[in-house]
Image: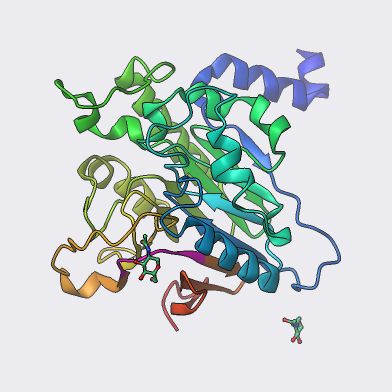
Amino acid sequence: MAGICIKPMVLCLVLVFVLGHAIAEFPKFHHRMKGGNNNNGTLNFLVIGDWGRRGEYNQSQVANQMGRVGEELDIEFVISTGDNFYDNGLSGEKDPEFVESFTNIYTATSLQKQWYSVLGNHDYRGKVAAQLSPYLHQVDSRWFCSRSFIVNTEIAEIFFVDTTPFVRDYFRAPNEHSYDWRGVTPLRRYISNVLTDLQLALKKSKAKWKIVVGHHAIKSVGHHGDTVELVNLLLPILREYNVDFYMNGHDHCLEHIRDKKSTIQFLTSGAGSKAWRGDVKPFNNEGVRFFYDGQGFMSLQLTEEEAKIAFYDVFGQVLHKWTSSSQLHSDM
Ligand SMILES: *[C@@H]1O[C@H](CO)[C@@H](O)[C@H](O)[C@H]1NC(C)=O
Ligand SMILES: *[C@@H]1O[C@H](CO)[C@@H](O)[C@H](O)[C@H]1NC(C)=O
């Protein structure tokens, strides 16, 4: 017992181990901000989703503009909201699509930063283990993809959630696609662990900005619309712990929607390549601040006091931007 009291770190590790994979599901990483940069201690990053198509469908044009904006903002990292490689994820660690759709496309100097990626449903159609493999980090050191994890950066805490296993449609037979569910079964326990871990982590978080990232939308007026499983299971948790932003891809568009019952803002950045689906659901008024059916990406600039958010099109033009205050949790 004495040993445990003297060494709280040991106790901590033992507890984590004893409590089992409830905690291990969400590994936490500290993103150390570069010292002495010229962005005055603000945390700047880009968000892109639904992109890997070997440069086609304007992927390369979007990548070029990300490079330009990334340079301007001196970004810290890039977040990928999933559907990293089309159509069927990666077939293995050595699948050339990794280099052809990622390394050879996001070539700008400003994009040679850490990428934090989640998996989308298309990624689950390939070998999931390939995208999670440390081998890809050797091929391109920017790459990091995991199921659910936390990135902590002084100003903001970013919670990445593996949303594909939540969507019941993918499990219905017959299904025109096959999915690699290894590692997420038994499903019921997997989902319940993800939710419990997220809840614990949000509860503990003291960050000024709490951001949750998943592939599927909670709210969307695009092709796929709302994801009911996330509305039912995830949204109540985000509301309870005052999450500021939920960021997703899946619908190939850009969107800014405000929650009617909380200060959460739903941000879709799923326009990294193929877009223009043209089947927008009728705006259900109040919540929707912005919708764009074409290609583009999003930037965030966070300080302790405010968040500046912008959406850009394929030409790098700002389509929509606004500032949220961390005190008021409202638009200014
Ligand atoms: C950096 O912060 C200082 C003090 O808050 C401010 O006066 C200055 O304009 C900022 N510079 C830039 C480049 O944002
Ligand atoms: C590329 O972007 C331009 C400008 O938005 C658009 O007109 C064009 O249809 C896009 N091409 C594809 C293949 O989506």
Q: Where the N terminus falls, by quadrant?
A: top right
Is any atom of residue 205 visible in this view? Answer: yes
Q: How many marks?
A: 0
Q: Position of residue 296 (x, y in %)?
A: 44, 65
Q: Is residue 293 magenta?
A: yes
Q: How is the image coloured?
A: rainbow
Image position of 48 (left or right of 216):
right
Which of the pair 46/63 is nearer the observer?
A: 63
Is any atom of residue 303 visible in this view? Answer: no
Can you tell which quarter of the image residue 258 is in? Answer: bottom left
Q: Is residue 307 above or below residue 166?
A: below
Q: Which residues are magenta?
A: 292-298
Residue visible at 49% across and 40% down in the picture: 118
Which of the pair 246/75 is nearer the observer?
A: 75
Q: Position of residue 44 (x, y in %)?
A: 64, 65
Q: Is residue 179 magenta?
A: no
Residue visible at 65% across and 54% down in the picture: 77
Residue visible at 54% across and 24% down in the picture: 130
Q: Position of residue 159 (x, y in %)?
A: 51, 45
Image position of 230 (left or right of 98):
left
Which of the pair 63/281 is nearer the observer?
A: 63
Image position of 239 (left or right of 199):
left
Indicate the quadrant of ligand 2 in the picture. Answer: bottom left
Can you tell which quarter of the image residue 136 is in? Answer: top right
Q: Where the C terminus falls, by quadrant?
A: bottom left
Q: Is residue 18 above or below residue 274?
A: above
Q: Is residue 315 above or below residue 261?
A: below
Q: Position of residue 265 (x, y in %)?
A: 38, 64
Which of the pair 262/295 is nearer the observer?
A: 295
